[in-house]
Amino acid sequence: MNNKELLLDIKNLSISFFTPSGEVKAVNDVSYHMYDGEVLGIVGESGSGKSVSSYSIMGLISDPGKIVNGSIMFNNHQIDKMTEKELQKIRGKEVSIIFQDPMSSLNPVFTIGHQISEVLKLHTKLSNEEIKKRSIELLELVGMNEPVKRYSQYPHEFSGGMRQRAMIAMALACEPKMLIADEATTALDVTIQAQILELMVELKDKIGMSIIMITHDLGVVASMCEKLAVMYAGRIVEFGTVEDIFYNTKHQYTLGLLKSIPKINADEHERLIPIEGTPVDLLYPPEGCPFAPRCEKTMKICLTQMPGYTYLSDEHYSACWLLDKEKFEGEKGE
Amino acid sequence: MTKKLLEVNGLKQYFPVKDGFLKTNYVKAVDGVTFHIDKGETLGLVGESGCGKTTVGRTLLRLYEPTEGQIIYDGVDITNVNMLPYRKKMQIVFQDPYASLNPRMTVGDIVGEPIDIHNLAKNAKIRKEKIISLLETVGLNSEHANRYPHEFSGGQRQRIGIARALAVDPEFIVCDEPISALDVSIQAQVINMLEDLQKEMGLTYLFIAHDLSIVKHISNRVGVMYLGKIVELAGSDDMYRNPLHPYTQSLLSAIPIPDVRLCREQERIILQGDVPSPLNPPSGCSFRTRCPYAKEICAKEIPLFKEYGNNHIAACHRIGEI
């Protein structure tokens, strides 16, 4: 489409967790790609596979989880074929991740400085002095006041927002090509969230990296992302630019999500329109389209066959039988 | 015409913390809060974590004993009375539907417990009927009564928590972040249910949340809290259209609007720094350390509430100048 370089190409990815109660298909035939410098949002409810599919980019799927099908090409590495040792060279260097809960992802017994230095020690040939200097620079980069003092402090001395800044400093230590932010601002207050989002945009431009924003907040998506993947029960049900998805919504689940959030600028009290029913139990997924039991426009075919993707443009596609209407018109179920 | 159901005057809640040898400091979780709630209305309380909104909710049910101040319920001062008869009128729904249900009790027993405590059922049959009708009220069914909490999803658990609160036929419910732990598609279900129940049963809510768009949606009036104090209180439309306090303004501007075009046009006031520690709040106005408009007076004097028409009150020295 343009001369941007392809950074990530995921093809037909399926990941299953083999639990004592049976196989859980956490990710089911997911394909998407990202170009250099893009910000992609992934939304979906808990258990929709949004985190698992992204963790696989770092090779972070561990027992009882397994990649059962598909390929992941990232920055010219075939991730799904790499050994643990090879993966370690990439993690933190070419792709980094920040998690939702900054308290449990920082080690409480080491100083912040030590934890940032660790990344640099592993991936660079800098001397100890240079590493310390660089770590302090990084703390400054993420907007920490008194970086020299912060360097020798422990995580418990930091507030939630500061911890998340420290996590970002650590993630960006080696100027990775891609940052995965897994609900990175969910645990933060709105005013702190605004600070962190601003910081991420600023650093993205400075370093020139791509970001995958995993979130359930459509507001965060609207303010940060260029493209959006909507996931439901392990599948991408709709993919497109944020404009496509907000204003030319094609999938009933996306539509339901957009309708169920209250509008802060609404003049009158409008009743919310919820998506009825409960999320899918992935141990016993329904036959056909997984959203069919909650969908308002379910047809007969939805209950028996999984819909394929209908392309509305090069970059906007959705998996819904309604889009295939011509073929099945007149066959409506109850 | 409208009657005040609950009045809170100068409520303070200090928690002691040991600070070194023999020295005790106090966390001023709630530091002089005054408001009232009319019968049948919903008052929203918003603020960032640690601002004391949950403590207000719990203190006015006397789950914590207030350090100072007065709580008046339906004309009676309940600050120092035996709460048992009032537990029948005032209930609470907690934030975390995973932690607030006893995993060893069946759903029927969880919902039935308040019925037993207040002797609301004459015999086992009536008790069972009551439980089933409560479960049906919140969109569950009789089969669910014999199951355990772990068999339910987050949204269903929150429904159980609501059924338990409704078991005593309360007049007033504190909803303490009842939907923050739920998925977006489930949040709307629970919000609609709370609204329906309010209409049917004439309930009064104190709705505590950090999600401002939800609070605006469900509340008649909204109070904004910062470091243990209410800084602004107004009708919810009024508050969102015309926020007066700089903190409210920045809080509102910080919410990312879930709409691509509106979001990109949005002007953000990004506050610097973090909320100060409630152990040692700043002198004068507690917001001054992060306020873009702070002046000398803000450090010296605690701003008092002033009314700016239409029951819109705010505490800031600089409204009118900014």
Image: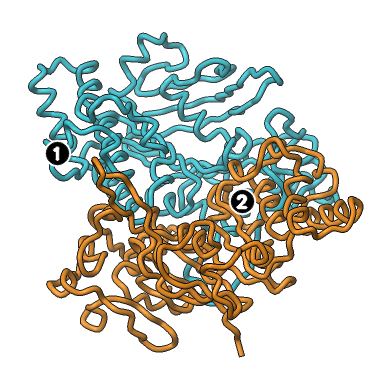
Chain colours: A cyan, B orange
Residue drawn at point x = 58 percent, y = 16 percent: A64
Q: Residues within 10 Å of mark 1 (few under 14, many from 20)?
A: some
Residue drawn at point x = 33 percent, y = 84 percent: B306
State which quarter of the image contains the N terminus of chain A: top left
Q: Chain of mark 1?
A: A
Q: Residues within 10 Å of mark 2 (few under 14, many from 20)?
A: many
Asked if the residue at tag 1 contacts the one at tag 2, i.e. Cβ–Cβ closer than 8 Å, the answer is: no
Q: Say if residue B220 shows up in the picture.
A: no
Q: Position of residue B255 (x, y in %)?
A: 40, 59
Labels 2, 1: one chain = no
Frontmost of labels 2 and 1 is 1
Side of B222 relative to A29 (left or right): left
Task: Kindly state the secondary structure of the residue where label 1 is placed.
Answer: helix
Residue A147 circle label? 1
Q: Residue A155, located in which quarter of the rendered image?
A: top left
Residue under numbered circle 2: B185
Residue A31 vertical placement versus B300 (above, below)? above
Residue drawn at point x = 30 percent, y = 62 percent: B268
Q: Name the amino acid type tagged 1.
A: Pro
Side of A248 relative to B264 (left or right): right
Residue A55 vertical placement versus A313 (above, below)? above
Q: Chain of mark 2?
A: B
